[in-house]
Amino acid sequence: MVVFEVNEVILYKMGVGWLKSNAAFSEKEVLFPVLVKNQNDFLKTFKVEIEGEALLSSIAFDTDIMKDLEIDYEGDAFTSILDILSGSKVDITTKDGQQVKGQLVGYQHLDSESEKSVKLEVILVDENSQIFHLDSNEIKHVVPIEEFFQKTLEDQLEILVKSKKENVKNLKISFTEEGEKVVNVSYLTELPAWQSSYRIYSLDKDNAVFELWSLVTNNSQQDWIDAKMQLITGLPISFRYDISSPWIIDRPFVQRPKQMGISVMTPEAEYKELARPAPPPMAAPAGARMKKAKAMRSVAAVADLSMEEEPYEYAVGAAESAEVITTTESVSFSLKQPVSIKKGESALLLLHSMNIPKETINIYNRQQHATHPFKSIEIENATSYGWEEGPVTIYDVGEYAGEAMLKRVPKGEKQIVPYLVEQDIVIKQEETSMSKKIGISLSGQYYVETYINNKTYKLEIDNKCEEEKTIICEVPKMYGYEIDKKKIKVDTKETPNYFRAKIDVEPKSLTKIEIPTFRKTSESVSIASISDEYLEDLLKLETIKEKQVEVLKKIKQIRKEKKQLDEQINTEQSNLNRIDQEYQRITSSIEVLISEGDEGKTRAKYVERMNNLFETMEGKRKLIEELEERLNNIDEEIYNLLDKL
């Protein structure tokens, strides 16, 4: 049996890998095992290289089309087999030695004496048309006589065996001729994404050893023994595509003519609606023999940083363990030594190790911890590639000190890595806010007030240890706020979400600092709706132009008239309401008085008074309408004047 051995593995960060395997043999046909779940990836990406005289002929595989499993092996297996053989000729032997040959009709369920079971009867018709009812519990053998049904049962058993076997499919690779040859097969397959893990060993105040490890898992169907390993950070586009199952194209159905001599015209539109794009041809491997091409790779340089007289010693473990190749798209780590990982196993591989510069600091963020800063190291990526996101473990003088999640760090950039709560430093943070109006202005048709909003962070740092500490205090960066550089007394930097203040704290000391921030805001109000007091403020502005003063004075005069009109309308409306009430009272009195005698005289006086009141009310209503019309005109005049500002 020909066995293909994996000799090279290329893993990507997005969950796929490129496997290369080879075998030497003379056979004309060989079987190549592929996991069923990876069959489509193999068929759309495989590459075959042949060292020898033979050429690749084909790669064949079983599609299992139209072969459904009809045996109910998890339920009633016997009845499902009877369903398969129904209508066929069978030879049945009972437990008492009776032999019955005939055509199997089927079976039926009958109630049994036991409530817990159902009796099954098999119905058979022999060559004399005699009908037999056989108790299934008494049947010893059922043998199909006809070759067709024997083959059907064999096929079903074969499908059952395949369904229970390991989920691997053997693809048959055929060549044009026999003879000694070396065949290299490579293809894309789903594999777990490799994961980055980092180690940082502090050597002294300014230096550390950086290590990059990777976790690799082999969940393929083959062992990787002494295979060349390459890990790539790039993210090539990859996708699943069903290329292995048959592509059945629906065709238009044309009815047969009911009368001879009459042709059938099928509209072209029907074909346009039903036609589908033809499937792309499967990429065929080149028939000519191929030669392997070896890429030239450069070895990454390793920094050599000088140590102090008595540093903690930790040797650089694997500076040359992998070749590092960087491109604009990705970083490739090619391990120089072969790697062996059996299927179902995972392994940690050391990719790179080198000295890097670092600085020990403490960083405080109240959202992360209310009273203590985190001991941290600020490291610089001095490698030739960007660091991917992953867990990092910190060692101090050879001992475990803490761990963190390392964010992506481009080459040449720095990152602060917090790994330990510094309990010897206690920090209290308070915030104060105030707002002050600093000016007014005229902007078009609007009265604008400008405010300055101050937000000050007050920190009290109690260093209880015997060493001087450098602390970076982070305070939230509120929207629109800036550091007040006129008041700040410490070194500050800005990140997307925080203001950072760097402070050196003496041993056994209590230090107080303030981080002042501010922002300017404006509130605008239409001049048409501001008060007379605000209008006077605008007229006092030194920056106002003579034309604007003229317009504002006219607006002020018109607004004064508007105010007088409002007062007059209110007065006239009150008088109208009073007169109307009197009019209604007199009307009610008239209704109860008769037209004769003294009551008649009183009624006449009320009628005269009512008429006078009616004329007065009509005059008041007309006056109010005229005043309101004038008021509307005044508003229009004000807006026309505002357009001139």
Image: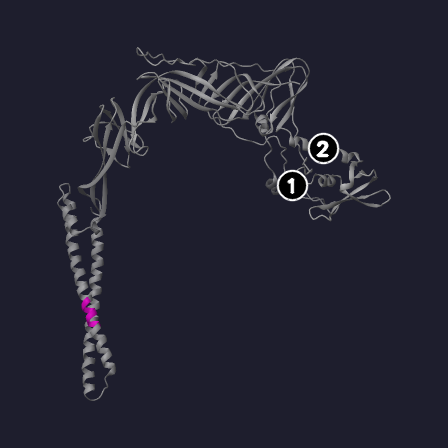
Q: Residue 234 location, x and y as percent?
A: 46, 24
Question: In the image, is residue 446 above or below residue 168?
Answer: below
Part of the protein shown in magenta: 574-580
Q: Position of residue 596 (x, y in %)?
A: 22, 88
Image-quadrant location for residue 169: top right
**Viewer-closest of 244 and 608:** 244
Q: Would you name the residue on which mark 1 appears?
A: 252
**Residue 519 visible to the viewer:** no
Q: Nearer the viewer, residue 129 or 392?
A: 392
Q: Is residue 576 magenta?
A: yes
Q: In front of the other: label 2 or label 1?
A: 2
Residue in view at x 23 percent, y 86 percent = 595
Q: Above or below — where is 59 with respect to 107? A: above
Q: Which residue is mark 2?
A: 155
Q: Is residue 41 magenta?
A: no
Q: Quadrant of the N terminus?
A: top right
Say if 42 sits above or below 206 in the image. below
Q: Are marks 2 and 1 in contact (CB under 8 Å)?
A: no
Amino acid on which disc 1 is placed: Pro
Residue at the (44%, 20%) spot, across then down: 213
Nearer the observer, 92 or 624: 92
Applied colour scheme: one colour
Image vertical order of residue 558 relative to residue 544, above or below: below
Name, please, the residue furthest toward the top: 309
In the rendered image, residue 94, in percent from the top left (x then y), is placed at 80, 39
Q: Residue furthest front?
A: 114
The answer to whether residue 228 is seen in the rendering is yes
Checking the image for residue 109, the label placed there is none
Under circle 1, the secondary element is loop
